[in-house]
Amino acid sequence: MPRPSRAALTAALLCCALTACGGSGTAKSKSTGPASPKASAPAPAPSVTPVPTLPPGPGGTTPVFSHGRRDGGKRVALTFDADMTAEQGPRAARGEHFDNPALIETLRRLKIPATVFMTGKWAEQYPDQAKSIGTDPLFEVADHSYSHHAFSTPCYGLPTVPRGEARADVERAFTSFRRAGVERIVPYFRFPGGCHNDAVLRELAPAKVTAVQWDVISGDAFAKQAAPVATQVLSQVKPGSVVVMHCTRSAAPTTEEAVRRIVPELRAKGYEFVRVSDLIAP
């Protein structure tokens, strides 16, 4: 396929750090409320324990979660998007790093539970890391699509999943996780760029996933310094917040340092770090 322009690549990588977009899609929080794309892969394997999900949205559509209860205690979920597109495979082969092992080790050392939203391509590129993350009780692995293509348009210049293939794309990513040995899979899905609309929420309903957005944008994508990222997170976090960050050295090289700044500050303010499943739980 033609090589995308530098501007398109930048927009595609940056999109996960931006607010949701696309058509008439809306983000409803709980507090307010395939081997091939054509094949239908099995549903995601259950985790060790039952995982809480939201009931279907209006008309049976896929439910959307963006933050937990504001009155449920000072709890915050750090989430990390492990992004990788099909087009970035050759760049990874040349040595570009779309993983961030130091970040994962820092989370372990600081004993920070987290939800990692992983693309199927990322799991295929880094199967050992995917398995390590996905077998660690500290973490849970959620779906971020197979190759980070848009599920509605416009969406920051991302290539688009063909109409009618949204569910197959999501299930293909779950299949990649299982092949890599990921065990702690949760039935959550994050739209690339957050872009969605009513039509795709209806199309994804049979997949029985809860779509997870966010209410705190870290700004770590392409950040050159960690301090502004930490300041941005600390200024936005509220009880029940979901923070979106990234697990890729290529696009977010300062995230690990930012986490080392964020964690002690939030702990000093009395915050407890939890996974998304903990916020969704009744």
Image (cartoon, rainbow, N blue to C red):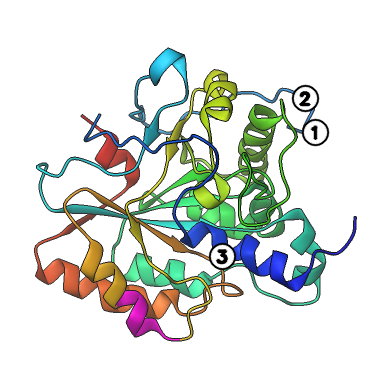
The quadrant in which residue 270 appears is: bottom left
Labels 3 and 2: the sequence-earlier one = 3
x then y, percent, for residue 9 = 70, 66
Structural crowding at the residue carrying mark 3, measured as other residues with C-alpha within 10 Å and reported as few (<14), some (14–19) or many (≥20): some
Residue for badge 3? 14
Q: Residue at x 28, y 44 (%)?
A: 67
In the depicted structure, whether residue 74 falls above or below residue 100: above
Q: Amino acid at mark 3?
A: Leu
Q: Residue at x 42, y 75 (%)?
A: 256
Q: Identify the image quadrant of the C terminus.
A: top left
Q: Amino acid at mark 1?
A: Ser
In the depicted structure, whether residue 188 falls above or below residue 118: above
Q: Which residues are magenta?
A: 225-230
Separation (CA) of disc 2 from disc 1: 5 Å
Q: Identify the image quadrant of the N terminus.
A: bottom right
Q: State left or right for residue 143 relative to residue 166.
A: left
Q: Is residue 227 magenta?
A: yes
Residue for badge 1? 36
Structural crowding at the residue carrying mark 2, measured as other residues with C-alpha within 10 Å and reported as few (<14), some (14–19) or many (≥20): some
The quadrant in which residue 162 appears is: top right
Which label was assigned to residue 11?
A: none
* Secondary-structure class at tag 3: helix
Q: State left or right for residue 212 relative to residue 16.
A: left
Q: Amino acid at mark 2?
A: Ala
Separation (CA) of disc 3 from disc 1: 27 Å
* Secondary-structure class at tag 2: loop
Q: Nearer the viewer, mark 3 or mark 1?
A: 3
Depth check: 210 or 99 in front?
210
Residue for badge 2? 39
Q: State left or right for residue 165 relative to residue 132.
A: right
Q: How would you classify the magenta stretch by its main secondary structure?
A: helix
